[in-house]
Image (spheres, rainbow, N blue to C red):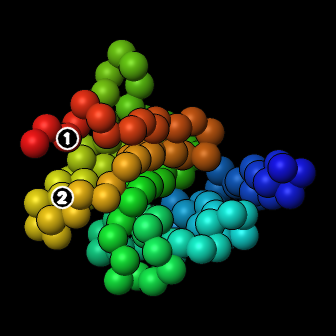
């Protein structure tokens, strides 16, 4: 747990509002790869910013879809009072591409983050039939 906490603190120290979304996506990817996600392939897929596969290769199904935004991009992040924001719209698009086009039933979580806040949730109410 100390390693996980220390890695998270380092990643958060490296967050830089002047840097690009790509920079922050790389910070998150490197953190995930270095902490208990080594047995899963972590990287971008198609237009998705970052995904965590259910296995060690990019050919394994996607289990988690992550949409990243830069720290100054809070206007694109969903809030309880307004979910209709770009980050959630993109997550839904990537989810539907995976679920319908790729027939992937292994997706368990959708996450949107700008390094400062996050919107995350399991898909129980999302999958029907």
Q: Residue furthest front?
A: 129
Residue 120 screen position, x and y as percent: 45, 38
Q: Of callouts 1 and 2, which one flags the residue occurring earlier in the amino acid sequence? A: 2
Q: Secondary structure at mark 1?
A: loop
Q: Which residue is mark 1?
A: 127
Give the answer, above or below, for where 108 lies relative to 42: above
Residue 35 screen position, x and y as percent: 72, 63
Q: Residue at x 29, y 75 (%)?
A: 46
- Label 1 environment density (alpha carbons within 10 Å; few <14, some 14–19, many ≥20): few
Q: Secondary structure at mark 2?
A: helix
- Identify the image quadrant of residue 45: bottom left
Q: Nearer the viewer, residue 7 or 114?
A: 7
Residue 92 screen position, x and y as percent: 24, 47
Q: Residue at x 19, y 40 (%)?
A: 127
Looking at the rendering, in which quadrant would you find the C terminus? top left
Q: Residue furthest top?
A: 81
Q: Nearer the viewer, residue 105 or 27?
A: 105
User: Would residue 16 appear left or right of 58 to someone viewing this image?
Assistant: right
Q: Is residue 61 visible?
A: yes
Q: CA distance from mark 1 to mark 2?
A: 10 Å
Q: Residue at x 52, y 60 (%)?
A: 21
Give the answer, above or below, for where 27 lies relative to 66: below
User: Would residue 89 appear left or right of 121 to someone viewing this image?
Assistant: left
- Label 2 environment density (alpha carbons within 10 Å; few <14, some 14–19, many ≥20): some
Residue 53 screen position, x and y as percent: 43, 69
- Identify the image quadrant of residue 99: bottom left
Q: Which residue is mark 2?
A: 99
Q: Residue at x 75, y 57 (%)?
A: 11
- Which mark identifies residue 119? none
Mark 1 and mark 2 residues within 8 Å of each other at the beta carbon: yes
């Amino acid at each position: 747990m100390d390693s996980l906490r220390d890695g998270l603190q380092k990643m958060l120290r490296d967050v830089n509002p002047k840097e690009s979304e790509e920079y922050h996506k790389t910070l998150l990817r490197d953190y995930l790869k270095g902490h208990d996600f080594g047995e899963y392939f972590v990287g971008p897929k198609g237009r998705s910013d970052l995904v965590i596969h259910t296995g060690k290769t990019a050919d394994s199904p996607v289990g988690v879809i992550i949409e990243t935004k830069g720290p100054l991009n809070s206007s694109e992040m969903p809030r309880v009072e307004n979910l209709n924001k770009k980050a959630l719209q993109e997550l839904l698009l990537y989810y539907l591409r995976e679920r319908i086009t790729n027939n992937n039933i292994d997706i368990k979580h959708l996450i949107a983050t700008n390094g400062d806040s996050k919107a995350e949730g399991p898909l129980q109410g999302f999958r029907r039939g």
